[in-house]
Amino acid sequence: MIRALNLFRSRATMAQSMLRSGANVGMQKRFLSIHEYLSMGLLNKYGINTPKFFPAKDSDEAYLSTKKFDGKPVVVKAQVLAGGRGKGHFDNGLQGGVHLVKSAEEARDLTGKMVGSKLITKQTGAAGRVCNSVMIAEARTPKHEYYVAILNDRVRQLPVLIASNQGGMSIEEVAKENPDAIITTPIDYTKGLDMETAKQVAHKLGFSGEQQENEAADTFVKLYKLFRERDATQVEINPLAESEDGAVLCMDAKLGFDEHADFRQKEVFEMRDLTQEDPSEVRASRYGLNFIKLDGNIGCLVNGAGLAMATLDLLSLNGGKPANFLDVGGGANAEAVKKAFEIVLEGEGVRAILVNIFGGIMRCDVIAEGIIKATKEMELKIPLVVRLQGTKEQEAKELIRQSGLKIQAYNDLDEAARKAVEAAAQ
C-alpha cells in the first residue's frame, strides 16, 4: 500500500510539473479500472446487495435481457470507463449515457444507438470513448441516497472509509459546499474494519431503522474485505441507496486496482478492456515503459520521475513545449528504447527529441545502443538531442561517436534543453 502511495505522490508531482509547462496532460493511470457491470459482479461475489443486472453487447441481447424483468422499467447504462456518463453525449447526437426505459423495444433501440458510438463526457475529453456494451439493470426507486468509498489516505498511510448522506451527486461538490457532511473513518490495515465501527458510521449517516443500519454496516465491512483481498486502490459506491422497500443496495460501483498486483489478481486483470485505454499507453506498458501524452513539439525520453520533472521544467523555461513523453524506468533494453522512440514519434507535431538519461540502474550504453538502433532502423529525420550521465557514460558517448549519426550530445542539461527547443523551432 505504501508503495502505491509513494508512486501516486511521484505521479502527482510530475503532473504539477507538466501543468506548469502549460501542457495538456493525458497521464497514464497507475491503476486498473473495470466496467460497471464487472464491478457489480465482483460486489455480488462478496455478498454485497445490488440491483439485478445483465450486460448486453448488442441490441438483441439488450432486448432479451430486458424481457427477463417481466415488463418492469429498467435502466440502460452505457459501459464506458469514464465518469459523468449520465450528463454526457454520443458522437451520433444521442444525449446521455444513462436512460430509464419501460419496454424491451425501447431498450433495444437505445442500445443500438449506444453500442459502437463514442460517449463524450467531462472526463473523456472531446475524443470520447467507444461504447462496446451496455448494462441493463432493474430500476429500484431510492428512498435516500448515500455515498461510500474506501480509499488509501496518503497522509495517514492507511485505508479510510469515506461516507456521506448526500449521495447521488459529485462528492467533490459536497466537500466544497458542505464538508461536515463527509465522514472519514481511518481503518487499521492489520485489524480491518470491524462491525462495531461500521455500525457507528451507518448510524451517523441516518438510515431509517436498525435493520437498515445493520445492512449498511455489513456492506461497509464486505466492501473493505473486497478492497484488501483484491489489491484495490478505490472502491466507490455512488449511490448506496436505501430503497423504498427498505433494502440497502449498491446502485453503482467504481472499482480501481493496483496495476502492480496483476501477478496475484488474475481474475480481476482478465476484466481489463484495452479498447478503453490509449493505444500508445497499452503498447508502452508491454515494454515496461510509462507513456504520458502531451501536446507540444519536443518528444522526451527520460528515466525516473525526478529527472522527468527537471526535463519538463527546463524545456518550459527555455520556451519549449514537451510532446509525447516516455519514462523508460530502470530495466529497459535496447529494443525497448527503440520501441520508446516509435511511440514518442506517434501522432503529429513532434519536431525534435530530447533524451535525458541519468544512468544508475539503467546503463547509459544500453540507452545509446537503443538510440542508434532506432535512428538507423527508423531513418530518423528530426533532430535528436542527447544528454547521458552516470553508469557506462563514456562507453555510451563512444558508441554514439562511432555511429557517425547526426546526434547532438551534451553534458549539461540546460544546454541540451536549449538546443532541443532551438531544433524544434527550425
Image (cartoon, rainbow, N blue to C red):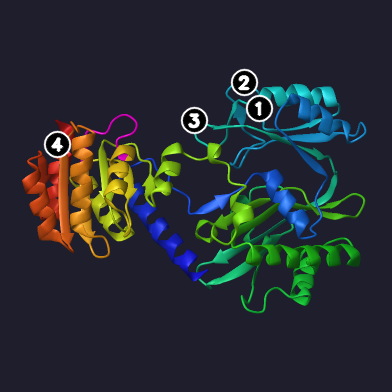
In the foreground, 342 or 193: 342
Horizontal side, residue 302 vs residue 107: left or right: left
Residue in the image at 42% along x and 48% along y: 285
Please name the residue that numbered disc 2 is placed on: 93
Q: Which span is picked out in magenta?
A: 344-353
> Measured from the top left, where is residue 238 in percent x and y?
70, 51
Q: How far apart are marks 3 and 2 (CA)?
A: 14 Å
For disc 3, the marked residue is 127
Q: Determine whether the residue tagged by mark 1 lies in a helix, strand or loop.
A: loop
Q: What residue type is labelled 4?
A: Ala
Specify whether residue 350 is painted magenta: yes
- Left or right of residue 398: residue 47: right
In which image quadrant can residue 25 be found? top left
Give the structural element (helix, strand or loop) at label 4.
helix
Checking the image for residue 423, the label placed there is: 4
Q: Please tell me which of labels 2 and 4 falls first in the chain.
A: 2
Considering only order in the chain, which callout, 3 or 4, is on the residue closer to the N terminus?
A: 3
Q: Is residue 329 magenta?
A: no
